Amino acid sequence: MSHQSVGITRREWLRGAGLAALGAGLLQVAPGIAHAQISATDASNNVYYRFKLGDADLIVVSDTAFQLDATIFGSNQPAEDVIAFFDNLHVLTPNNSVNTAVLNLIMLSGDTVAVFDTGTGARLARTINDLGIGTENVTDVLISHYHGDHVGGLLSGGALTYPNALVHFPQPEYDYMQTAASNVVGSAQAAIQPALDNDQIAFYAADAEIIPGVQAVYTPGHTPGHMSFHISSGDAQLLHVVDAALNAYATLPNPTWHARFDTDPALAVESRQALLDRAATEKLQTMGYHFPFPGLGYVARQGEGYQWVPVAF
Ligand SMILES: [Zn+2]
């Protein structure tokens, strides 16, 4: 086989799998580059992973990735222990940070085009258009909680990014926002205001069926009204934990570690333990919003905690 034909074969394979963008990203991991220099963020690339869940087509889009201070993931532990934990996994950057993905799930099922959270506004909407889905054809936007990396993509230039979609927002989260300080929830309130003004928002209760096949799973603690999602199509199921577990490699083995972003850390631990126990017991396909791309895999028991078993593809 000539060198050229190898190249063509590989390109065709990448295109066929819809992974060309990811392939380009992997090329950045060149020999001799220190592990701390690896970055998954290239804003010029669409990065997505497409798979089937029963009859539904699901796509994970990488909206962006950012560096978070490592100690955020174990705020009730000695900082040096948390830093050493990540350093031991070779994922610590020179400034003691950890690369953290932002992953948005799209579900195509019958007439439904649902988007789970909206990212920061970096790559998600553009990728939806580049995939030929079209932001104007999104029927439902499901919001898990008020944080900026989840509602930040609701608006583009002040207008609704998904102009024809109904925004589903957790009722307990909205209730909390009514009394919370504006410096905490003000930007989220601004992000949902156009949907409120347009009567394009619906509030869902804890454990409600939000749209057909998608059940809310009330997991408070990260924020007061944080929701995870149980998605099913036929016999196939996917548990999207969203931010109930923030870091696949630290939070799962150490589910009692607090995250600095958690509004009520003790309640977050309680929700997390129940959710991870369910994922392991029911052997559910699982997704994390901030897990390494594509954020899909399984939760296996390991000692007092859990182990992340990422999907192989
Ligand atoms: Zn988040």
Image (cartoon, helix red, strand yellow):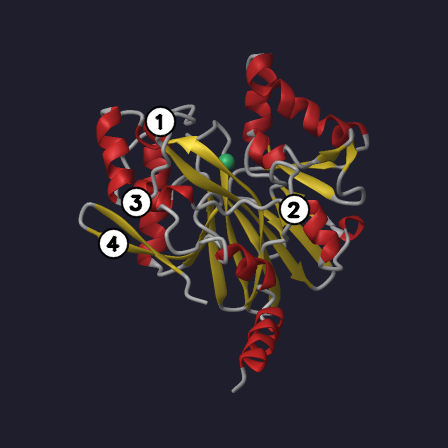
Mark 2 or 1, nearer chain start:
2
Q: Amino acid at mark 4?
A: Arg
Q: Amino acid at mark 2?
A: Leu
As drawn, is 156 to the left or to the right of 144? right
Mark 2 or 4, nearer chain start:
2
Q: Amino acid at mark 1?
A: Pro
Residue 75 location in percent, x, y? Answer: 31, 25
Q: Callout 2: helix, strand or loop?
A: helix
Label 2 sits on residue: 124
Do the CB atoms of the residues marked 2 and 1 lie less than 8 Å apart?
no
Q: CA distance from mark 3 to mark 2?
A: 29 Å
Q: Residues within 10 Å of mark 3 (few under 14, many from 20)?
A: few
Mark 3 or 4, nearer chain start:
3
Q: CA distance from mark 2 to mark 1?
A: 30 Å
Q: Which mark's residue is nearer the viewer, 2 or 4?
A: 2
Q: Is residue 191 visible?
A: yes
Label 1 sits on residue: 265
The single residue placed furthest to the bottom in the displayed view is 1
User: Who's the residue at 57% across and 34% down the image?
Assistant: 149
Q: Callout 1: helix, strand or loop?
A: helix
Q: Callout 4: helix, strand or loop?
A: strand
Q: Which mark's residue is nearer the viewer, 3 or 2?
A: 3
Residue 235 location in percent, x, y? Answer: 49, 68
Q: Amino acid at mark 3?
A: His
Mark 3 or 1, nearer chain start:
3
Closer-to-camera residue (202/306): 306
Label 4 sits on residue: 301
Do the CB atoms of the residues marked 3 and 1 lie less than 8 Å apart?
no
Q: Callout 3: helix, strand or loop?
A: loop
